[in-house]
Every structure is written in structure tokens, then in C-alpha cells.
């Protein structure tokens, strides 16, 4: 049963609730993880991934990229239980940063950001393809309402058998779409 207040569906798609991991992280890293894990289920994947990127960059700029003990078996097991490549890359980058004195190592950070940017681009493409399919379906529906019984001719052009019009002569085969509304 979905409880949108205490246990929203987009946070309960995994073996553990997302909060079980985010409560172990600082604010910026917890939010980044939250947005990464909910992105596939909330309905605005690209937007959520962009928010995650913003929080990761904020953590890096403020030099509070999470420092944690990546040797702690329970923590590692929890991270892996989510099965998210982006989450694993983020945690690996943060673990690499703990061995350094200062902000995240540029190579690890760059690799994670590249993965995140790729995921954002993929999500944006999928959203545009879905929007295109919806618009095409709406156009088809409108054509069927406006021209019942004649919709098959729009994709092939108009032929003499569909609309006999002797006044056009041989030019009728060149006409792809003409609509006369009275």
C-alpha cells in the first residue's frame, strides 16, 4: 500500500527505504542520493538527476563531500542493495575523496559527473520521445475526428480513388494533402 506521506512509492522501490541511507550522510550528499534513487520512479527523471548534480557540486564546493568509513560492511551492503550504478559511482568517488586532504579528487569527480551527465541526457531524450509519441497520438485522434473514414489517406497522400476530382486531371497525384472546410 502506498503511503504518500510516510512511505512514498518512489522511495520504497528498493529492498531498503532511501531514508535508511540518506540519514547516514550529510545534508548535501543525502539529497544527492535521494534524487538519484527516486529519479526513475518520480516521473521527472532528468530534473531529479539535475538536482542531484547540483547537490554534489554544492558538497564539493563547500568541501563537505561526504567523508565516511567505506570499510564499514553494513554501510557498503546498504549502498549495494539499491543496485544503482549512479549511486555506486557517487559513493566510490566520495570514498576516494576520504583518502585525500581536501575536496574530491578531480578524476573521480569527473568520472562521476560524466556518468551523471550521460544519465541526464538519456532521461531528457526519453522524455522528448514520450512527448513526441503523445503528440503524434493526439494528432492522429484529431485527424480521425475531423476526417472519419479517410485517415488512411493522410499517410499515403490523396489518390484519385479516394477523392475523385476530374477538374484536377493528372495533377491530383501530386497533391499530398488538401482540406476544404465549409
Image (cartoon, rainbow, N blue to C red):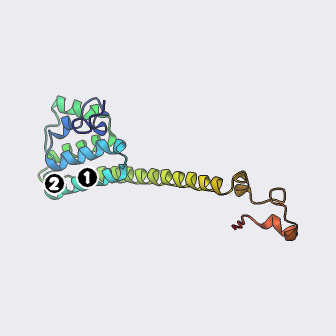
Instruction: Determine which residue is flagged by label 1.
Output: 109
Residue 101 screen position, x and y as percent = 11, 51
Using the image, determine if residue 167 lies above or below residue 66.
below
The answer to whether residue 99 is visible is: no
Q: Residues within 10 Å of mark 2 (few under 14, many from 20)?
A: some
Task: Kindly give the residue lying farthest to the left in the view shown.
Answer: 101
Residue at 71% across / 67% down in the picture? 180
Residue 170 screen position, x and y as percent = 87, 68
Residue 73 screen position, x and y as percent = 18, 29
Q: Secondary structure at mark 1?
A: helix
Residue 32 screen position, x and y as percent = 23, 48
Q: Which mark is residue 151?
A: none
Instruction: Determine which residue is flagged by label 2.
Output: 103
Q: Is residue 97 left or right of residue 155?
A: left
Which residue occupies the foreground of this view, 129 or 177?
177
Residue at 70% across / 65% down in the picture? 179
Specify the quadrant that holds the N terminus.
top left
Task: Name which of mark 1 and mark 2 comes first in the sequence.
Answer: 2
The answer to whether residue 129 is visible is: yes
Residue at 36% across / 50% down in the picture? 44
Q: Is residue 1 left or right of residue 130?
A: left
Q: Secondary structure at mark 2?
A: loop
Specify the quadrant that holds the C terminus.
bottom right
Q: CA distance from mark 1 to mark 2?
A: 10 Å
Residue 13 in which image quadrant = top left
Q: How many marks?
A: 2
Q: Are marks 1 and 2 in contact (CB under 8 Å)?
A: yes
Residue at 36% across / 49% down in the picture? 45
Amino acid at each position: 500500500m502506498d503511503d504518500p506521506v510516510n512511505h512514498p512509492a518512489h522511495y520504497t522501490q528498493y529492498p531498503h527505504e532511501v531514508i535508511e541511507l540518506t540519514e547516514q550522510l550529510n545534508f548535501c550528499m543525502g539529497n544527492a542520493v535521494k534524487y538519484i534513487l527516486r529519479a526513475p520512479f518520480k516521473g521527472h527523471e532528468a530534473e531529479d538527476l539535475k538536482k542531484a548534480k547540483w547537490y554534489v557540486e554544492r558538497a564539493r564546493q563547500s568541501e563537505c563531500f561526504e567523508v565516511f568509513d567505506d570499510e564499514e560492511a553494513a554501510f557498503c551492503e546498504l549502498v549495494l542493495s539499491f543496485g544503482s550504478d549512479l549511486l555506486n559511482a557517487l559513493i566510490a568517488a566520495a570514498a576516494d575523496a576520504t583518502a585525500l586532504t581536501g575536496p574530491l579528487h578531480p578524476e573521480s569527480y569527473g568520472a562521476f559527473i560524466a556518468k551523471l551527465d550521460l544519465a541526464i541526457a538519456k532521461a531528457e531524450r526519453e522524455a522528448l520521445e514520450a512527448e513526441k509519441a503523445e503528440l503524434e497520438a493526439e494528432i492522429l485522434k484529431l485527424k480521425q475526428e475531423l476526417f472519419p473514414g479517410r485517415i488512411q489517406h493522410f499517410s499515403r497522400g490523396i489518390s484519385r480513388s479516394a477523392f475523385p476530382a476530374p477538374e484536377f486531371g493528372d495533377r491530383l497525384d501530386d497533391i499530398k494533402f488538401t482540406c476544404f472546410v465549409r
